[in-house]
């Protein structure tokens, strides 16, 4: 035994076995105790509960949902809600961040002052406080009868009312996909190597697919029109409430605004850092070539800054995606809230937490993988990156 | 000899060059100026000019005024800062907060930056805080954790998180850098798993789910379980920062130490960690800042910290309309803490980059 401990290899193997074994037995012991406790409460462990009806309602859902639906359907609704909120939050935060970040890098002292005050104020206040604030602000707005109305939009204590097309939900989803295709396909056609042998066909192919996809979107919307209704549904006051249009619930609006404002202040700093990382020599060279200020910005500074920003931006997006879990603070039915409600109602604690972990792991990994691909695709080749 | 330098521009000329050099510049300047004036005037009018400060007239006076109703703060500041802490004993809660602030300020002074001194300051500060808050000794009456609240609870959770999380992060970073593949891989897996989860889900798991998986004698109070969860989350992020700092230490340093016959612990504590911590300092301060802001999330698992006590302060009867004032007050408190800490971090970063040149 003594000689075994003096042998480096044997000692290392023993050390590792003890470390992994101790951690493993901790986890197993915890799981066993949990099973025992759950059995004492009459809950059978396992994933059978996924196919049982939930018996409770969700407050927000893009898909049809009723209490007789099984748990797996509710989890799906939760994930879609989280992605939906996340997508809105990411886009608005990026817009805010770009504007503020550009203001911060501007040569104008006043614009810089504005950008800096924005970042200093909103970055230093916790996100959850901002969510509570916006939620309180919206729910304290005047009731529908005295709503703030403009251009068919109405802002009331019951949420934001926006005008929508009178179409079936599925048609709306289909049209959104077609619109996405109208943007993505031309970009893909511009980059694919398959057309390298026939470069003159690139432009027509891009134009053609874009027009086709747009026409497809219009067609889908036309086919999906609800019969016997006007083209647009505009919110209008009937009695004590607003009828027509689409009601965006206060909690969703509050979350999007808070994520846009708070995330925007972080993204502004990333944008600023990206522009700071562009080598001085590059800008000077561009200036001395006689490029106009706009050309220097759009052809030299922006593309280089974008490449410097992207990896940090990806981290920020993953962070913002996780921030959607704040939905539970104001009652928005995001993925985490569905999991918490499931634990409350069914008692399937370990399984629900496992599903939560798996869900976020998948979301985060796919975001990271997507950004890695973009990063690789736009990375500069060779040694042009010297400042 | 004639002076070849161009004549210094007059004030008007200087203004023109700075703000109206081109039409676009002029537009940006005017827009910014307009925005600053508008927002500045609205804020000034709301917060000071039309505001009500006098608490003696109660909520009625506020209904007539157009501006902020600061009398809600005058009437309710005790509940926001101290929560449900017994009224006569609230001086203890205030003193405890001062102790934490003093501890933080002390640990920002470079003279205290040795492992032993920092540890001593933080242990002393936390002990003072704990004794003041909990009582039961030195003639102080006993106050259980369930009645802690407001700012004091926020600070306690933050300090305890750092106190547990920081050493844990160093351990995790060392384990992840271990040469034994199974140890480094398992640690890496744990760190990555924790980092991929939202903090709320970890707090929720520790507060509500963990009692199922623990034997009774190990469950402890919900407050301490949540602190352990948030410390684990802090440590997972901080471990990667520390690891980054360790990677910045030149290989030769470790080899030289080994050649001198230093043991593993001597190498880690005398050679590796001091240099790694120096490399990691700016990112570490940043992590403290983030962690302080995220402490606010415990409101979701049902703690009466400063945001929850703020909700309670305007949530009852007569003050129901005064949410903006209460949230502004809390935001201001967070701002003071977070802004000074992050300014300090930026100052350190500048100072250290000067040292490297």
Image (cartoon, rainbow, N blue to C red):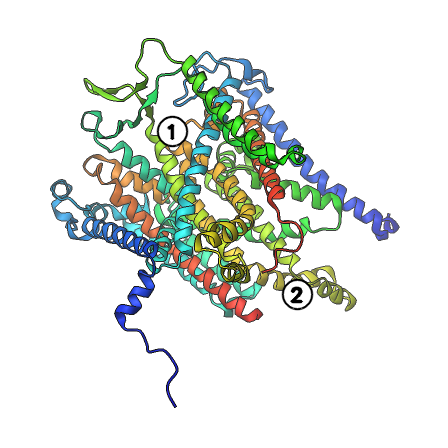
Placement of A284 over or under A216, stated as above or below: below
Residue B8 versus residue A72 in the image, above or below: below
Residue A365 pos. (x, y %): 59, 35
Q: Quadrant of residue A45?
A: top right
Nearer mark to the viewer, of 1 and 2:
1
The image shows residue B18 at horizontal and vertical percentages of: 33, 64
Circle 1 chain:
A
Residue B125 position (above or below residue A167): below
Seen at 68% across and 60% down, the residue is B268
Along the line of sight, which residue is nearer the eye, A90 or A348?
A90
The quadrant the C terminus of chain B occupies is bottom right
The residue at the far right in this view is A3
Residue receiving disc 2? B270
In the rendered structure, the answer to whether residue B210 lies left or right of residue B334 reads right
Chain holding disc 2? B
Asked if one can make out residue A344 in the rendered structure from this viewpoint, the answer is no
Establish if A239 lies above or below B32. Answer: above
Q: Residue furthest front?
A: A200
The residue labelled by disc 1 is A331
Residue B261 pos. (x, y %)? 78, 66
């Amino acid at each position: 035994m003594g000689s075994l401990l003096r042998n480096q290899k044997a000692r290392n193997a023993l050390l590792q076995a003890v470390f992994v074994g101790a951690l493993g037995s901790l986890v197993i012991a915890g799981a066993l105790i949990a099973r025992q406790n759950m059995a004492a409460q009459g809950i059978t462990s396992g994933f059978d509960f996924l196919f049982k009806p939930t018996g409770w309602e969700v407050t927000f859902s893009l898909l049809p949902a009723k209490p007789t639906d099984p748990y797996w359907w509710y989890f799906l609704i939760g994930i879609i809600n989280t992605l939906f909120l996340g997508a809105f939050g990411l886009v608005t935060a990026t817009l805010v961040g770009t504007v503020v970040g550009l203001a911060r890098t501007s040569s104008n002292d006043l614009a810089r002052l504005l950008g800096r005050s924005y970042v200093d104020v909103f970055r230093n206040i916790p996100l959850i406080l901002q969510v509570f604030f916006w939620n309180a602000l919206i729910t304290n707005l005047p009731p529908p009868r005295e709503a703030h109305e403009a251009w068919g939009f109405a802002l009331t204590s019951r949420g934001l009312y926006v005008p929508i097309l009178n179409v079936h939900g599925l048609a709306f989803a289909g049209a959104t996909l077609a619109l996405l295709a109208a943007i993505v396909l031309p970009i893909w056609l511009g980059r694919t190597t398959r057309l390298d042998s026939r470069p003159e066909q690139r432009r027509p192919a891009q134009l053609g697919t874009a027009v086709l996809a747009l026409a497809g979107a219009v067609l889908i919307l036309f086919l999906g029109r609800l019969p016997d209704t006007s083209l647009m549904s505009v919110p209008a006051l009937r009695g004590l409430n607003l009828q027509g249009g689409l009601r965006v619930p206060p909690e969703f609006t509050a979350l999007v605004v808070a994520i846009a404002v708070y995330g925007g202040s972080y993204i502004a700093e990333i944008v600023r850092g990206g522009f700071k990382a562009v080598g001085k020599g590059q800008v000077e060279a561009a200036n001395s070539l006689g490029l106009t200020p706009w050309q220097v910005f759009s052809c030299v500074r922006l593309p280089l800054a974008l490449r410097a920003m992207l990896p940090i931006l990806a981290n920020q997006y993953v962070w913002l995606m996780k921030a959607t879990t704040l939905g539970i603070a104001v009652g928005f039915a995001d993925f985490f809230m569905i999991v918490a409600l499931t634990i409350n109602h069914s008692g399937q604690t370990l399984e629900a937490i496992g599903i939560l972990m798996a869900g976020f792991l998948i979301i985060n990994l796919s975001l990271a993988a997507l950004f890695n691909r973009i990063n690789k695709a736009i990375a500069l080749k060779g040694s042009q990156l010297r400042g | 000899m004639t002076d070849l330098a161009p004549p210094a521009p007059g004030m008007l000329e200087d203004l023109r060059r700075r703000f109206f050099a081109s039409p676009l510049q002029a537009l940006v300047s005017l827009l910014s100026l307009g925005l600053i004036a508008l927002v500045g005037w609205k804020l000034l009018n709301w917060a000071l000019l039309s505001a009500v400060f006098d608490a003696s007239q109660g909520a009625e006076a506020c209904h007539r005024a157009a501006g902020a109703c600061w009398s809600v703060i005058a009437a309710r500041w005790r509940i926001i800062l101290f929560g449900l802490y017994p009224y006569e004993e609230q001086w203890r809660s205030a003193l405890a907060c001062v102790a934490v602030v003093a501890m933080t300020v002390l640990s920002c002074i470079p003279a205290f930056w040795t492992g032993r001194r920092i540890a001593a300051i933080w242990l002393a500060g936390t002990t003072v805080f704990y004794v003041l808050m909990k009582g039961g000794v030195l003639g102080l009456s006993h106050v259980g954790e369930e009645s802690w609240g407001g700012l004091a609870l926020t600070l306690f959770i933050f300090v305890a998180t750092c106190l547990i999380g920081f050493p844990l992060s160093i351990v995790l970073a060392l384990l992840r850098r271990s040469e034994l593949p199974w140890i480094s891989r398992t640690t890496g897996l744990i760190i990555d798993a924790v980092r991929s989860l939202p903090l709320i889900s970890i707090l929720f798991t520790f507060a509500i789910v963990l009692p199922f998986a623990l034997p009774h004698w190990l469950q402890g109070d919900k407050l301490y379980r949540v602190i352990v969860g948030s410390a684990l989350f802090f440590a997972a992020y901080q471990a990667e920062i520390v690891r980054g700092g360790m990677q910045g230490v030149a290989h030769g340093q470790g080899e030289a130490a080994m050649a001198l016959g230093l043991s593993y612990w001597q190498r880690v504590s005398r050679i590796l960690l001091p240099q790694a911590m120096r490399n990691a300092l700016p990112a570490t301060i940043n992590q403290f800042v983030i962690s302080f802001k995220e402490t606010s999330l415990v409101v979701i698992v049902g703690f009466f910290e400063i945001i929850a006590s703020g909700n309670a302060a305007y949530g009852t009867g007569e003050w129901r309309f005064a949410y903006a004032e209460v949230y502004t007050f809390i935001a201001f408190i967070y701002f003071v803490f977070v802004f000074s800490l992050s300014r300090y971090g930026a100052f350190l970063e500048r100072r250290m980059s000067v040292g490297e040149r």
